[in-house]
Amino acid sequence: MVFAHAALEAAAEIRNIEAVVGHSMGAAALGYALTLGLPAERAVLISGPSRLADVLDRFAGWIRLGPR
């Protein structure tokens, strides 16, 4: 996920991150970034998707992408 890797790159520059907050896809991205080692002491993840595949399938339909 591009957003997760962007969070890791930002963390390398910012240092000493006390907390991160993500909503919806941001929550999913930060959750993934945390598993990759994002060094945040606390995280607030609001209304993240329970299944990322479902969200991506709906988005693909919304923008009229064909099957994979």
Image (cartoon, rainbow, N blue to C red):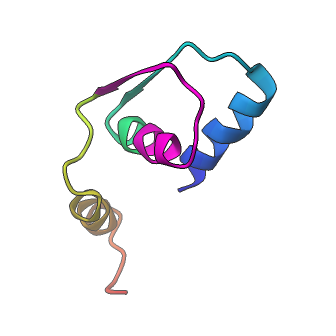
Q: Position of residue 9 (x, y in %)?
A: 73, 39
Residue 42 magenta? yes
Q: Where is residue 33 in the image (x, y as percent from the top left)?
A: 52, 44
- Residue sitting nearer the eye, 57 or 23: 23
The answer to whether 51 is drawn above or below residue 43 in the figure is below
Q: Which residue is drawn at 46% across and 38% down?
A: 30
Apparent side of residue 45 relative to residue 16 in the rendered image (left or right): left
The magenta stretch spans which residues?
Answer: 29-45
Apparent side of residue 21 relative to residue 15 in the rendered image (left or right): left
Q: Position of residue 56 (x, y in %)?
A: 32, 62
The answer to whether 67 is drawn above or below residue 60 in the figure is below
Count of residue discs: 0
- Residue sitting nearer the eye, 46 or 59: 46
Q: Residue at x 28, y 61 (%)?
A: 62
The answer to whether 9 is drawn above or below residue 11 in the figure is below
Residue 41 magenta? yes
- Residue sitting nearer the eye, 38 or 59: 38
Q: Which residue is drawn at 66% across and 40% down?
A: 8
Report the quarter where the C terminus lies.
bottom left
Q: Residue at x 54, y 24 (%)?
A: 40
Residue lying farthest bottom?
68
